[in-house]
Amino acid sequence: MKKNINKVVLAYSGGLDTSVILKWLIEIYQCEVIAFAADLGQGEELEPLEEKAMATGAGKIYIEDLKEEFVKDYVFPALRANAVYEGSYLLGTSLARPLIAKKQMEIAKKEGADAVSHGATGKGNDQVRFELSYLAIDPRISIIAPWREWEFRSRKSLIDYAEKHRIPITITEEKPFSSDRNLFHISFEGGVLEDPWQEPPENMYVLSVSPEKAPDQPSYLEIDFERGDPIAVNGEKMSPAMLLSCLNKMGGENGVGRVDLVENRFVGMKSRGIYETPGGTILQVAHRALESITMDREVMHLRDSLVPKYSELIYNGFWFSPEMEVMQKAINDTQKNVSGTVRLKLYKGNCQSVGIKSPYSLYRHDLATFEEDAVYDQKDAEGFISLNALRLKIQTRFKSNEQK
């Protein structure tokens, strides 16, 4: 049953889906549509949005610069946790959705809108991320999810609709990739990528050169951290967004940060995604290296045990959940001494830590050395091993008695 809607705020990217949705909402709901685009670092993609949205029928468009907030309040907290989904995905799209939803809800309140809408399909994760965020902020809001309502069943049908209504689009049947870009990454899915046996075409990549075409000489850089957050590159202090932009450039030039992943979506199916995350890859390698000398062993292992759950919460759309709030507080507390400098080497797609220093270092050369020392009695290890072997010896004797 169609809802009685007078005004709706649409999360608008100017891509195929949301361009069609804008026109469709006006036709089907006979309502005013306010377009909202979040500037998360898409660059030139944002330039034509205002003209395009108004030409398609939007009553108004908001384009909000959220780059600093995105990196400071969403990317950096995830990096403190070394968040990674299923071993490879650094959660670039997943981290952006709650911020977009939060700002969209603020605009809806300001405009007195009855509903919010998004372009996520009924098969994907983004519908869950958007809608869980909307409802966590205001449970009374009406949500319109066109992909779950309309008659279109493929991107080809959307292309036909756009051509019929003279809506300008950049996607074609020959290159039907769906991509999402922000300051942290760019993702690609769909088209030939739906066959996991097919290698991604090289001309698809945006943020990085192929490792084969990267420079033949390595690049070195240093990153300074304070309480788990990066604050400077090569001694130059920068804002969060500026710092990530700088590392994206350096990483991309060296072919760093490409991932080809078949992942498990929250809704139950597997999908293939191609990701470029050059700056984020550098930061995670550097952060892990600094933690190796500044974090207590048991604190690190406890925090690491939380990472799969923390990453899953982000991936599944529970950024604004009470369990996420508790987990983030715990992770932040583990970072109080994660300050110092990491030197990194970038070379043909690889990123390697080659130097670490910190005023909070727990690394003791006089303890770790293989040379002569006066602070560690190696004979102490005998009792340590004997006590730890006790249960193993008892188990072996028990098995021997059973076999007799």
Image (spheres, rainbow, N blue to C red):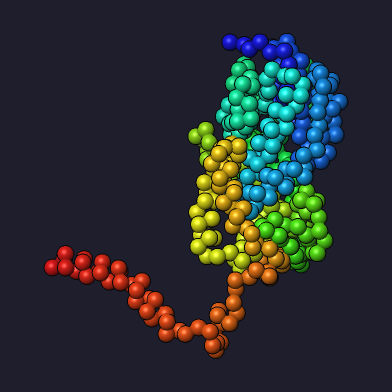
Residue at 58% of width from left, 52% of height from top?
331
**361 left or right, relative to 255:** left
Residue at 61% of width from left, 66% of height from top?
294
- Can residue 88 be seen from the camera position used here? no
Seen from the viewer's position, the closer of residues 127 and 356 is 356
Residue at 68% of width from left, 23% of height from top?
116
| Up-down relation of residue 301 to residue 158 (above or below) | below
Quadrant in the picture for residue 127: top right
Quadrant in the picture for residue 348: bottom right
The residue sitting at the left extreme is: 404
**218 left or right, relative to 362:** right
Quadrant of the rendering where the N terminus is positioned: top right
**168 left or right, relative to 266:** right
The picture places residue 259, in percent across and down from the top left corner, at 63, 49
The picture places residue 7, in percent across and down from the top left corner, at 73, 16
The picture places residue 313, in percent across and down from the top left corner, at 55, 41
Seen from the viewer's position, the closer of residues 49 and 164 is 49
Seen from the viewer's position, the closer of residues 22 and 155 is 22
Seen from the viewer's position, the closer of residues 102 and 24 is 102
Residue at 50% of width from left, 34% of height from top?
268
Tally of marks: 0
Quadrant in the picture for residue 217: bottom right
| Up-down relation of residue 382 to residue 332 (above or below) | below
- Can residue 141 be seen from the camera position used here? yes
The picture places residue 333, in percent across and down from the top left corner, at 60, 55
Quadrant of the rendering where the C terminus is positioned: bottom left
